[in-house]
Image (cartoon, rainbow, N blue to C red):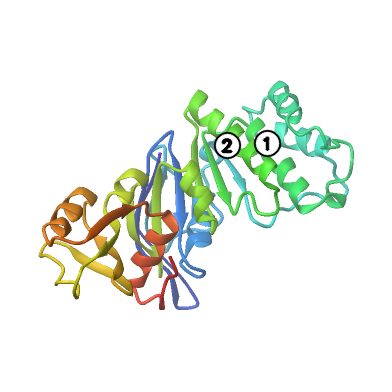
């Protein structure tokens, strides 16, 4: 669906993207994570055709997005900072979107509105709360029936019930129409629940791009205790982080969980336990290897 091939972009001589490679499969929910300044917003602006890359190639459905009206008509974008016309209400914007998108489905628009019973379609959007404006954005964007939905901090300002409602609608479109979703967010816990592919970005390039299952199976969190001092970590396992409290050590190991467990059990510990590793922890430890300034983690 999305192919980013060796893309670079600089602003006033300062690199924002550096030979970026990215691949987003059709029908997937792809989560892009990274620290502030990693280049997430920059690549999003390239994907929607606002920026033009200095070098490389960006393809959506096999075609370049820059100045390609047919491709842009397949994309809906919800930015972090949403703008609508000053005097417009939701019905005004519905008419505006229906003129822009040939695929706009007015019947589906009113169906989605039923999921947000507190949404007043005739009230000026500028008078709504931030969370309600986000609801308006999702109603309008999903009614466009896009092939690709791009989200930048999509549920910021929404309460937990509305977050679940919106993600339910989005995932329903992915299941029913194989819509592709590209989402950038700092809420890693939420991404872990909805994404099937993840890219970790730093300093304008991707550190890792994998399915979430593969990513979670490549790093292992183990609690282990020995009667005496812990012996050296066996060969074939890379120690990313260690915290010791008395005899109990919590280890973050790079390697397949079952293999790591087998090798650690061969050291005859008093006990050993494999713990679930969150996307947030994976993010921290991968960036820790990139000198991100990670000092310590409290488990």
Q: Quadrant of residue 60?
A: top left
- Rate crowding at label 2 as few (under 14), some (14 to 19) or many (20 or more) other CA atoms within 10 Å: some
In the figure, 85 relative to 1: above or below?
Answer: below
Circle nearer the N terminus (1, 2): 2
Q: Is residue 153 above or below residue 115?
A: below
Write the residue at 67% across / 25% down. 105
Report if residue 66 is visible in the image.
Answer: no
Q: At numbered mark 2, what does the secondary structure look like: helix, strand or loop?
A: loop
Write the residue at 14% across / 72% down.
Answer: 232
Residue 67 is situated, as x and y percent measured from the top left of the image, at 53, 47
**Residue assigned mark 2:** 73
Tell me the residue that label 1 is attached to. 100
In screen coordinates, is 281 left or right of 186? left
Residue nearer the viewer, 20 or 238: 238
Q: Residue furthest top?
A: 107
Q: Nearer the viewer, residue 283 or 297?
A: 297
* C-beta proximity under 8 Å, tags 1 and 2: yes
| Picture quadrant of residue 263 | bottom left
């Amino acid at each position: 669906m999305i192919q980013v091939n060796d893309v670079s972009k600089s602003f006033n001589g300062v690199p924002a993207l550096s030979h970026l490679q990215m691949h987003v499969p059709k029908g997937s929910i792809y989560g892009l994570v990274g620290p502030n300044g990693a280049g997430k917003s920059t690549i999003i602006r390239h994907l929607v055709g606002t920026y033009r890359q200095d070098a490389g190639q960006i393809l959506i459905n096999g075609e370049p997005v820059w100045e390609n009206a047919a491709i842009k008509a397949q994309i809906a974008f919800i930015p972090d900072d949403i703008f609508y016309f000053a005097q417009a209400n939701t019905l005004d914007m519905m008419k505006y979107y229906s003129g822009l998108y040939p695929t706009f489905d007015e019947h589906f628009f009113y169906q989605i509105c039923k999921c947000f019973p507190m949404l007043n379609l005739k009230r000026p959007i500028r008078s709504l709360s931030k969370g309600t404006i986000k609801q308006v954005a999702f109603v309008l964007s999903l009614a466009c029936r896009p092939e690709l939905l791009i989200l930048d901090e999509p549920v910021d300002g929404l309460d937990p019930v509305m977050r679940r409602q919106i993600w339910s609608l989005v995932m329903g479109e992915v299941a029913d129409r194989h819509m592709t979703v590209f989402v950038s967010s700092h809420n890693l816990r939420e991404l872990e629940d909805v994404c099937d592919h993840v890219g970790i970005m730093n300093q304008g390039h991707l550190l890792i791009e994998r399915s979430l299952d593969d990513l979670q199976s490549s790093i292992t969190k183990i609690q282990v205790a020995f009667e005496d001092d812990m012996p050296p970590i066996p060969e074939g396992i890379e120690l990313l982080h260690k915290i010791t409290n008395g005899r109990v050590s919590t280890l973050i190991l790079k390697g397949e969980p079952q293999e790591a467990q087998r090798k650690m059990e061969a050291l005859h510990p008093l006990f050993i336990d494999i713990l679930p590793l969150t996307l947030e922890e994976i993010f921290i430890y991968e960036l820790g290897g990139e000198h991100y300034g990670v000092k310590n983690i409290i488990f």
